[in-house]
Image: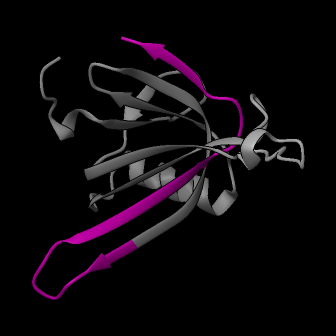
């Protein structure tokens, strides 16, 4: 596998619920993180007093974050609408030479900023809100 360009890691939003995803505009940096909680089942009988974990238990989750240049385009408007109305639409994350992760996410944070002599920028954070699917490339 060759080194991949960071700009190819894309966050896409299902704009209308019909499965047609559109790349969230203006992003310069994106990140996805997968998490799994552990369930500790260690007891007095645990061999050598080593911790034991219950396989397949616990809550799995994913978070997505991104930052970029505010463009006030169609996807920006839709993101604002999703946040203020508390919607949980489907998002897709394209991970180059790895695959696509897709599922429902809630926008948990939407921040806008700008400096006097710079561009207006924004940051967005999302949390998984249901089962995710993965399709390898």
Q: Nearer the viewer, residue 48 or 114?
A: 48
Quadrant in which the C terminus appears? top left
Quadrant in which the N terminus appears? top left
Residue 102 appears in view:
yes
> Where in the figure is residue 8, as x and y percent of width and height?
22, 32
> Where in the figure is residue 104, as x and y percent of width and height?
64, 36
Residue 52 appears in view:
no
The quarter holding residue 54 reads top right
Q: Nearer the viewer, residue 100 or 106?
A: 100
Please, what is the dominant secondary structure of the magenta stretch? strand
Image vertical order of residue 21 relative to residue 31, above or below: above
> Where in the figure is residue 106, as x and y percent of width and height?
63, 50
Q: Nearer the viewer, residue 56 or 69?
A: 56
The quarter holding residue 114 reads bottom left
Report whether 91 appears left or right of 121: right
Q: Look at the image and say whether residue 97 sits in the magenta stretch.
A: no
Report whether 132 appears left or right of 109: right
**Looking at the image, which residue sits at the far bottom?**
116
Q: Look at the image and say whether residue 132 sits in the magenta stretch.
A: yes
Image vertical order of residue 52 relative to residue 131, above or below: below
The quarter holding residue 86 reads bottom right
Q: Nearer the viewer, residue 95 or 87?
A: 95
Tell me which segment is drawn in magenta: 112-137
Q: How is the image coloured?
A: one colour
> Where in the figure is residue 135, as x and y percent of width and height?
48, 14
**Looking at the image, which residue sits at the far top?**
137
């Amino acid at each position: 596998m060759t080194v991949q360009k960071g700009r190819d890691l894309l966050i896409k939003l299902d704009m209308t619920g019909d499965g047609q995803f559109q790349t969230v505009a203006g992003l310069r940096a994106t990140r996805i993180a997968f998490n799994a909680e552990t369930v500790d089942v260690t007891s007095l009988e645990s061999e050598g007093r080593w911790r034991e974990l219950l396989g397949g238990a616990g809550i799995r989750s994913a978070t997505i974050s991104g930052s970029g240049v505010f463009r006030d385009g169609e996807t920006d408007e839709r993101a604002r609408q999703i946040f203020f109305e508390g919607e949980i639409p489907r998002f897709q994350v394209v991970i180059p030479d790895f695959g696509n992760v897709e599922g429902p996410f809630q926008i948990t944070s939407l921040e806008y900023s700008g400096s006097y002599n710079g561009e207006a920028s924004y940051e967005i954070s999302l949390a998984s809100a249901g089962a995710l699917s993965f399709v390898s490339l």
